Image (cartoon, helix red, strand yellow):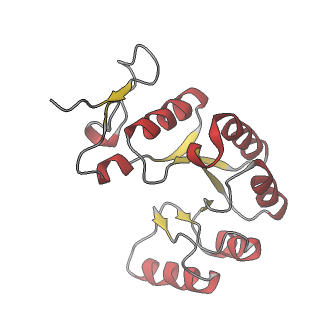
Amino acid sequence: MLDANQGYSPEQSLGLLRRLRGRGIVPVLFEQPAAAEDYAGLRAVSRHGGVPVAADESAGSREAVLRLVRRRAADVVNIKLMKCGILEAWDIAAIARSAGLGLMIGGNIESSLAMGAAAHFAAGLGGFSFVDLDTPLWFSRDPMRGVAIGPGGVYDLSRVRAGIGVVPRHET
């Protein structure tokens, strides 16, 4: 997965994809390869880049996702609970699905508390093709414990008995 975070123009994104392809590298997904409001640019990368385009900064609300759908500007919608909350995320997923867009669950720089909630949301709703819930790994010491990324990069939710399975880490 490649994330431009709005840092490239559509032309730069397409050029990067060509250079990568020339080296035998084809990303499975290109996230936000143009500015959030550059729907024509997102669509161009989606149509001509040879890889699915995910909208992230362009997909923070129901209204934003409806604009993406109307403009056919992306192939996948990255849902982040911290941007929109659970109820709006549910609606965003329904809008994306009804338009034939793929689903991705992601997060900002968040502890395992937020990532655990996102993992449960994605597992409960189902149908997420892309999961990017790795930001707890960026902490030298996550302030929470419980649900965590296990072997193979997989969240194991099978042992959760109450809530989302995450509690504060108490210093001993």
Camera-side residue of 83 and 56: 83
Q: Which residue lies at the image location 78% right of the left edge and 62% below the top edge?
A: 72
* Quadrant of res 93: top right
Q: Which residue lies at the image location 23% right of the left edge and 51% below the top edge?
A: 140
Q: Which residue lies at the image location 63% right of the left edge and 35% below the top edge?
A: 86
The relative height of residue 16 versus residue 69 in the rendered view (above or below) is below
The residue sitting at the top extreme is 161
Q: Is residue 26 left or right of residue 47?
A: left
The relative height of residue 166 versus residue 127 in the rendered view (above or below) is above
The residue sitting at the right extreme is 70
Instruction: Estimate the x, y position of residue 52 in percent, counting from the top left.
Output: 60, 62
Q: Which residue lies at the image location 55% right of the left edge and 32% below the top edge?
A: 121
* Quadrant of res 95: top right
Camera-side residue of 20 and 87: 87
Instruction: Estimate the x, y position of residue 12 in percent, counting from the top left.
Output: 56, 85
Q: Is residue 16 left or right of residue 42?
A: left
- Quarter of the picture containing the N terminus is bottom left
Q: Is residue 42 left or right of residue 3?
A: right
